[in-house]
Image (cartoon, helix red, strand yellow):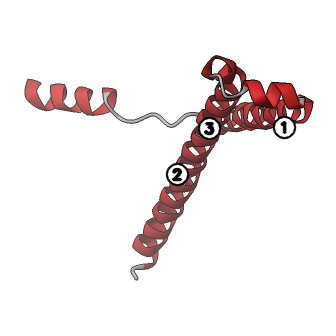
Amino acid sequence: MDELRLEGLLHDALRPVEPPQRMSDRLHDTFSAISEAAASELSGWADELTASEMESLRDPRNWVRPVVAVAAGGLATGALVVVGFRRRSRQRSRLGEVLNETRSRTGL
């Protein structure tokens, strides 16, 4: 009897918890803002360069600003993709649950 109770407790404790939709929306908005800021930083940086600054780009020490912007934009965009996939998969699983419940009620 204790084994069944322990198994039930473990099952309840280790059940995955889905984040609230509000949190997902906030993450999406934050990552979108970071991606847009990185893109505008790169765009503004490229527009500001003079001919001598373009020449100085041959020195890797001058690559910090564009590398940081590309990295931040890439990470934020990757996170947006992950959040979008999770959101879509959660919606599909809920739709599947509704379909299964409807099938079981109607006997189809």
- How packed mark 1 is, by other alpha carbons closer than 10 Å (few <14, some 14-19, many 20 or more), is few
Q: Looking at the picture, how far across and down is residue 105, in whole percent?
A: 44, 72
Q: Looking at the picture, how far across and down is residue 87, in whole percent?
A: 58, 49
Q: Quadrant of the N terminus?
A: top left
Tell me the kind of residue under disc 3: Gly
Residue 90: numbered disc: 2
Residue 6 shows in the view: yes
Residue 16: numbered disc: none
Q: CA distance from mark 1 to mark 3?
A: 15 Å
Residue 74: numbered disc: 3
Residue 1 shows in the view: no
Q: Give the quarter of the image for residue 24.
A: top right
Where disc 2 sits, the SS reads helix
Residue 43: numbered disc: 1
- Is the residue 33 above or below the residue 90 in the image? above
Residue at 65% x, 39% y: name it: 21
